[in-house]
Amino acid sequence: MKTAWKEFLTWFLVQFLGIVLFILITFKHLTFLRSFAGANHIPASSLMMLLSNFSLYLLLSYLIYLFTFQINGTVVVQILAFTLGITFLFLFPTPEKTWVYLLFLAALLASPFFLFLLEQREEKMSASFAAEKENYDLRKNALLNDIEEKETKNERLRALLKRYDLLHQVVKTVTGSLEADQLFYLILQNCHKLIPKGSAGLKSVSESLDPFDTWVLRNERPLISLGKEKNLILASSPAQLSFESVIEAPIFHHGKITHLLKIEDREEGAFEEEDLRLLTDLAGIASITLSNALYFQKIRELAVTDALTGLYVLKFFKERLDEEIKRASRFSQKVSLLLLDIDFFKKINDTYGHQAGDAVLEKLAETLRGCLRPADIVARYGGEEFAVLLICCSRPEALELGERIRQETEKSATLFKENPIRCTVSVGAASFPEDALNPEQLIRKADEALYRAKRAGRNRVVSA
C-alpha cells in the first residue's frame, strides 16, 4: 500500500507542478494573480479561465500518456471526465455561486486518486490471474504430456498386439505342417512377417558357424547383439561379418540344438528386445513342430517299412507296383519284378537260433540296397522272401541284376557271435509287358519262376 501511495503522490506532484507552470506562463493568469492580491473573492471569469486551462492541461497530459503507454480503462475515464468538465465550464461560464466550480475542481482532483487505486487493484488482479493462468498452463502441459505419453504407450501396445496376433496366425500355419522341409520353409517365410528387418536365415549346427552361432550353441539361449564393434563376443574371436546387428535363437529337438534361427541387419542397433522375444517364441514353436514332424515321419516310416530290415512292407510295395505298372503302360515303358527266397533258411534258424536268422535277413537287406539303383524299390515280401521292383528295366537287365544279387549274397557272410554264416538265394524274374499285363499276373509269373529255381536246385536265377 505504501508503494501505491508513493507512486500516486509522485504522479500527482508532477501533475501539480505542471499545472503551476502552465498557470505561470499564462499571461492572463498573471493579471488574475495581481488582481486577486487586493480582492476578497475570485472573479468568476478568472476562475472559469483557470479551470478551463487546468482541464486543458490535464487533457493534454493524458493524451501524451495515451500515446506513450498503453490504453486502459483509467485513461479513458479520465479523458471522459475532463472533457465533461470543459463542456460544463463553457455551458455555465458565469454561475451565481463560485463554490460550484470549487466542488467540480475538487472532484477532478480526487478522481485520479480513486482511478489510480482502481488501476492498482486491476494490476493485482491481473497479476493474480496471470499466476493462475500460468499454473493452469503448467497443469495443462503436464496433462498434455501425460496424454501424449499414454498415447505413445497405447500405440506401442496396439503394435505389439498386432504382432502377437500375427504370431498366433503363424503358429496355426507352422503347426499345420508335418514335413520337416516344408516346416523350415514356413518358418523363414513367416519370420519376415513378424520381424520385417534384415534378412532371416535357418542354419543347421553341422554347417559353418560364426562367433555368434558358437555363442548360442554353447550357452543354449537366445542372443541379441546391437553392434559387432561393441560386442565382447568378437573380442576373443574376431571375424569378418557382413552385418552390424543380429538376433538369434536356438531350435531344439530331444533337448539338443539342431538348428539356429537368425536375423541379420547391416544397420547398427536395428533390433529391440521385443524383436528377440518374438524370434524366441517362433523358435520355440519351431522346436515343438519340428519334433512333431520328425515323430510323424518316424511313424510313417514304421507304417511302410519293416522294423527288422528297414525295407518297405508288402502293402506299400503292392501299391507302388500298381502305380508303376500304370505309369509304364501309359508311357510304353518296361517294369521288371524279382522275387528272392533264402535257401534253407529254416536250417539256419534251427542251427544258430532265430537271432542269427534275423541277422541273416538284415545282411541280405543290406546287400540288396547295395546292388540296386536309387529308383528301384525293394521290400520284405514275407518271412525270408524279398521282392524287388525294377523301374524302366527289361527282362535281360532284370536277369543280370538278379545274378549280381545272387553272387553278392553267395560270397558274403553274416558274422554272428564270431561265427560266419553263409547263405544263398533263389531268384525268380518276370517283366511287364512281356510276361504279364497287370500287377497280379506279374507277381504270379515271378513266383512261378522262383518255384522253378528252387526245384532246379536253388542258388540260381530263373525267368518266367
Image: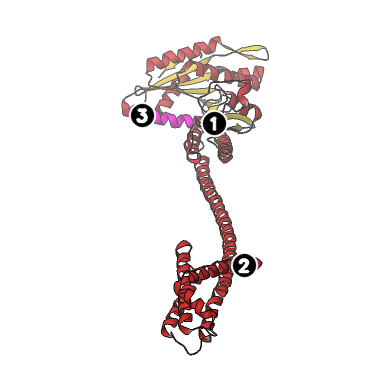
Look at mark 1 in the image and give the residue it sits on.
Answer: 245
Question: For this view, does 1 lie left or right of residue 409?
Answer: right
Residue 410 is situated, as x and y percent measured from the top left of the image, at 54, 11
Question: For this view, does 222 lie left or right of residue 440?
Answer: right
| First in residue order: circle 1 vs circle 3 | 1
Look at mark 2 in the image and give the residue it sits on.
Answer: 4
Q: For the N terminus, which image quadrant? A: bottom right
Residue 312 is situated, as x and y percent measured from the top left of the image, at 51, 27
Q: Residue furthest top?
A: 411
Depicted 405 relative to depicted 262: above or below? above
- Looking at the image, which residue is at 44% across and 86% down? 94
Instruction: Write down the region rendered in magenta.
Output: 306-328
Q: For the C terminus, which image quadrant? A: top left
Q: Residue furthest right?
A: 417
Question: Which circle, 1 or 3, is nearer the viewer?
Answer: 1
- Looking at the image, which residue is at 42% across and 28% down? 321
Considering the numbered disc 2 on the image, is that residue within a helix, a strand or a loop? Answer: helix
| First in residue order: circle 1 vs circle 2 | 2
Q: Are marks 1 and 2 in contact (CB under 8 Å)?
A: no
Depicted 458 relative to depicted 232: above or below? above
The crowding category of the residue bearing disc 3, from other C-alpha atoms within 10 Å (few below 14, some 14 to 19, many at least 20), is some
**Mark 3: amino acid:** Arg
Depicted 120 relative to depicted 216: above or below? below
**Mark 2: amino acid:** Ala
Residue 163 at least partly seen? yes
Q: Report the predominant secondary structure element of the magenta stretch.
A: helix
Mark 3–mark 2 Cα distance, whole angstroms, equals: 116 Å
Look at mark 3 in the image and give the residue it sits on.
Answer: 327
Give the camera-side residue of 405 and 73. 73
| First in residue order: circle 3 vs circle 2 | 2
The crowding category of the residue bearing disc 1, from other C-alpha atoms within 10 Å (few below 14, some 14 to 19, many at least 20), is many
Mark 1–mark 2 Cα distance, whole angstroms, equals: 70 Å
